[in-house]
Amino acid sequence: MGRENIFRVRMFKEKGYSRQVCGSCKANFWGRLQRENCGDTPCTDYYFDEVRLKTPPLSLGEVREKFLKFFKDRGHEVVDPYPVVARWREDLYLTIASIAVFQPHVTKMIVKPPANPLVIAQPCIRLEDLGSVGYTIGRHLTNFIMGGHHAFNYPDEYIYFTDETVELATEFFTKHVGVPEEELSFKESWWEGGGNAGPCFEVSVGGLEVATLVFMMYEVSDGKYVEMPLKIVDTGYGIERITWLTQRTPTAFHAVYGDLVSTYHKIMGIEEPPVKLLQAVFKRAGRWDLRDPAQFESLKKLVSYELGLPEVEVFKYLDGAVLVYNALDHVKTALLMLSDGVVPSNTGEGYLARLVLRKVFRVLSKLGIGADSVLKMFELQAQTWRSLYPRVSDNWNYVQEVVELEYRKFQELVERAPSIVRRYLSRGSPGLSLEDYVELYESHGLPPELVVEASLKLGYRVSVPKEFYSALASKRVKAPIKKAEALPVPREVYERAVKLPAVEKLFHVDPYVREFKARVVDVIGDYVVLDRTAFYPEGGGQKADRGKIVVGGKVYEVLDVQKVGDVVLHKVRPEPRDISPGAEVYGEIDWDVRYSHMRHHTATHILLGVLRKIYGDYIWQAGAEKEVAKGRLDVTHFKLPTLDEVRLIEREVNRVINEARPVTFKTVPKYDAERSYGFKLYQGGVPLEPRIRVIEVMGIDAEACFGTHLRNTAEVGGFKLVNVEKIQDGVVRFEYVAGPQLVEYAHQLEEKISSAEKIVGGELLERLPKFVKELEDLRKTLQRYREFYRNSLTRDILERREVVSENCSVSTVFTELLDEKLFTETLKDYVKEDPTVVVVLISNEVKKARIEVSEGSRASSRVDAVDLVNRIAKIVGGKGGGKRDHAILVVEKLVQRDEVDEIRRVILERVRELCAAS
RNA sequence: GGGCCGGUAGCUCAGCCUGGAAGAGCACUCGGUUUGCACCCGAGAGGUCCCGGGUUCAAAUCCCGGCCGGUCCA
């Protein structure tokens, strides 16, 4: 199919549409009427308010229902929307389009779609337009519902493609939205994203693009387009935009948020602009790019002239309104993300949630809005949207708690700002450089507006450098290409293993199988492949089994077990040189190791279930590991559990164990599992398979899992948390022991206590307070001795003091006890009292000597302590240095009596020389 | 996952660039003064300079590694 021809669909010919060229963007478009331009912004102004619709104004929910019903009536199955957090995708954090729901498993033909054709009203979040929201009066939103009808055409199963897609869209817009057909414009375009590409139509009405019809048919690899075997109809209908179209309000926010627009104005203390002002803006918002500050400025001036309103008024109204629209949009986006269980943090999707929250908090806190009102703003939206997005009301308690916490954290940052800014102001050059602004933002999270504010508080007037945003943008580096995951086995082993047939996994059939018979399929280096095995390969956080295999009477130890696709590799010792394919094998796994893994694994599932029950559905597994000695589970959570909570968790887990609940496993089709259990199935990641293995702990937890589990929770035997810590903002780690390991753990504790008691010679609780008291007494005694020593030293200095002139005196003291800190302190105090003195303190230790020269202020103006030290070094050797009034010399030997005399003589002579000279 | 910033007295921080005697303000204790709202004056106590290693005669300071906190980005 040629790329040109694909746009020549059946309907255009039948109904007499003509292919035209836009006078502005030169793109080709199709329409029944001849027109000057393609009918899409920015080639035209908005005029959809003048288009006569045959339907009454519709709400967002009504448009959504109308859309779903229309396509349902045309043979599409309605598919429930997925979460806005794209947990099923490794390459995306947020659901950015309805097709994302089916990538990559369906688009790569690993799994069939849940229905075909299908229709979905998918809530989406796109944060790349974060900065545009408000200025475009509603064309850009960070959250929106994308209506998509999708048809997946397989080589052997054709559903429908271009002709039907255009006809369906036309019928929907004309008959059900009530758009006169002459007003429809289909612009030819090209869509590319997520590794796929294809031609598309952009459908517009009165300047507003309301849908994109993509015919996905290429895979993009190395910049080349490779035709896919699967041809996908990927459509996106802007449910918000259609709502706007039917309501013809001056902004999309009025159409989508209704009364909330006024309410938000009131809460934020911002006056609502008069309708005629907004209408004047509406008329130009299509062609003008108001995100450009210069254009926004000109528009405001133009509107002020046109309506005869003072410029300041227009500026005040519109700047304020943009803030309100921002708040409406961002609060809803944050609400949707949090309701889907995102925990704000400094990485991943948690960071994106925080980014959105902070952007709106920045404005709210500047307006002086308190936490109560902020919560009110969230609550109003939670009420408005709870029927359209059911998860919003399910998780409201969590949302409330987290919004409050995040707002408090942000206010703390604002409070901290002046002291951080002060640090930057006080270093080096006056004011703040461009680099300072960038660093303040990137390292401390302080946007330039906040920096200016903080500087004002400190009494500095600074202004944001114009280049700030471009400097920031130029620092953005491309994402590093994700490192290919390390292979579990050497490459040559991997490449041969991957071609072998699937191995029968006895550990899945019955996790309690300890011994088995099998045949050798292949031997690759140290690795043996069998046709069936009970050895569990490392995976799903569960470590590999150990044990032995016997071939031809020879025993091989199994050191490691790994899997490559559906093939299990046993690494054995000694080298399996004598083993050849076809040989019979007897295998036996180390049951103690395995059973311990199973206990910790089942305990992990129980713990996760209990945590979700206690805290809420925002608890997600962020990592897990099950070993012989202990289990470990990292979950998303925003605060460290208290001691009481830890005890509660332990009690609840043990209760589940004592209730002896059955643990079952079954392998079911992916979509059935998702329907019955929801997304919480995918705690450990999403398996790219048509059928998935579901482990269910009755009434507590159900997860897609590869691991081996107990039959009954009673077998866990007992559960004790041994460590709970916050490993990262938003992630809490639990470590625990189960079954006999609990006894091991108790033993370790006992041993620790008893060895400590051996050291203190008695009971810990009795002896320790005595030790502490004794230590205190000793400290006091030592202090008294040092005081004594210090006095005696001071006396020695005084006694040895020889006056050289009115400005200089010398005292050389020799001692055989070393207490560096005491010396330094004593000398410092002494020379403060006597500014004329030069003190030389010589002290011997076991193998080295330390000579310290200290001078009073008047003495040091004539005599350089460093010079004296160098002279001393000539007598005793060693190296040293220091400042003019204080220098130190260390020698790796003891100083002899005669050397002390020599030093005394030399120093006196030198000081006399210098002081007399002045 | 990557980058950047920080960790010094109970708190807020200076000192680090350029290695050489551990500092300020607030809080605390004592004495005086005052008895109207951040009182004032004087004295004192308080330190694992995050941890480990290296360089050096000498490290809070320089280098390497780690831990913790903050923050930006993917």
Image (cartoon, coloured by chain):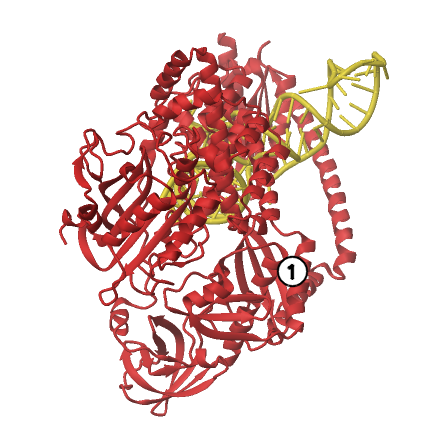
Chain colours: A red, B yellow
Lateral position of residue A164 relative to residue A826, left or right:
left
Picture coordinates of residue A877, whole percent (x, y)? 45, 34
Q: Is residue A424 visible?
A: no
The front one of A352 and A604 is A352
Above or below residue A307? Residue A259 is below
Picture quadrant of residue A812: top right
Looking at the rendered structure, the number of numbered marks drawn on it comes to: 1
Picture coordinates of residue A87, whole percent (x, y)? 43, 55
Picture quadrant of residue A230: bottom left
Which residue type does callout 1 highlight? Ile
Lateral position of residue A130 relative to residue B23, left or right:
left
Above or below residue A288? Residue A535 is below
- Residue behind mark 1: A649
Above or below residue A718? Residue A4 is above
Write down the chain letter for disc 1. Answer: A
Numbered disc 1: secondary structure: helix
Residue at image point 47% right, 71% down: A707
- In the picture as drawn, the residue positioned furthest to the bottom comes out as A553
Q: Is residue A83 visible?
A: yes
Picture coordinates of residue A582, whole percent (x, y)? 28, 88
Picture coordinates of residue A112, whole percent (x, y)? 33, 65
Above or below residue B9? Residue A762 is below
The front one of A572 and A816 is A572
Picture quadrant of residue A756: bottom right
Quadrant including the N terminus of chain A: bottom left
